[in-house]
Image (cartoon, grey):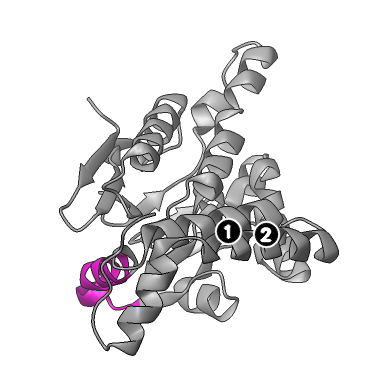
Amino acid sequence: MSLVRYEVEGDGVAFVTLDSPDTRNALSDALLDELIAALEDAGCDPDVRVVVLGSSHDRVFSAGGDLKAFASDAPTIDKYAGLDRFPRLYRLIGSLGKPVICAAGGDVLAGSFGVALACDLVVAREGVRFGCPEINVGVFPFMISALIYRNVPRMRANQLMMLGEPIDAAEAERLDIVNAVVPADEFDATVRDWAGRIARKSPLLMRLGKDAIDATRDMALPDALSSLQSQLALAFTTEDIKEGVAAFREKRDPIWRMR
């Protein structure tokens, strides 16, 4: 049976749902392969304008990596090769060209904390927890430490990784790890509202913008500014930027040409 559900709604929103509740959506090789494939499908589909990454489990977004696989007797070289799925997934989210919203309706732990941090926006349900408890079972959050250090202040990042104690959604919002914390009865509606609002923006300009962010985030400032200047000049050549300005002046909804 499929471990990841993929559905596209008419408003251009693709819902990618982790659906392995018996394993608390453990990030096994099989689940990661399906997740990567679903995101690649969303990236290639011209009708998809935004992706919502969620979970079918009512308490857990994902418990993180498959601990049984970590402790198995499989050859080390095979384990090493399998770990390539994590950086591929994180890079794919960044380079997808379409915004990805993490709908954190349950606890976001271990490797899935890295998935959330790789997303563009995170909407969390009140009461969910975020953290990397790997150290508690004799592991360390190696793969996600790069993402944590790019999103969380250094001392708090060390605390999360070295004590292995999670934080609640309210604290995650205070640390700017999540964008919004929403009561349970408003969570689904809020996620859909955010996705719908993004889907109504110019897909072309959104892609140019997200690609620019992905390309320049780790550049030195002078190099980043030079690259961004070129991207802005490219945006000036599109019909969508002209349509957007015209619609604003005429007080009407824009009709995106996507060129």
Residue at 37% over, 58% down: 203
Looking at the rendered structure, which numbered label has been put on residue 230?
2
Residue labelled with disc 1: 234
Within 10 angstroms of label 1, few (less than 14), some, or many (20 or more) residues?
few
Image-based side of 59 in relation to 235, left or right: left
Q: Which residues are magenta?
A: 182-197
Within 10 angstroms of label 2, few (less than 14), some, or many (20 or more) residues?
few
Residue at 39% over, 54% down: 259
Furthest residue toward top: 75
Q: Nearer the viewer, residue 246 or 160?
A: 246
Say which quadrant the N terminus sits in.
top left
Q: Nearer the viewer, residue 74 or 1?
A: 1
Q: Is 196 situated above or below 139?
A: below
Q: Nearer the viewer, residue 180 or 57?
A: 180
Q: Callout 1, which amino acid?
A: Leu
**In x, y percent, where is residue 232?**
61, 65
**In x, y percent, where is residue 213?**
61, 59
Image-based side of 3 in relation to 109, left or right: left
> Would you say residue 79 sits in the magenta stretch?
no
**Discs 2, 1 touching: Cβ within 8 Å:** yes
The reply to whether residue 127 is in sight is: no
**In x, y percent, where is residue 182?**
33, 77
**In x, y percent, where is residue 35?**
39, 36
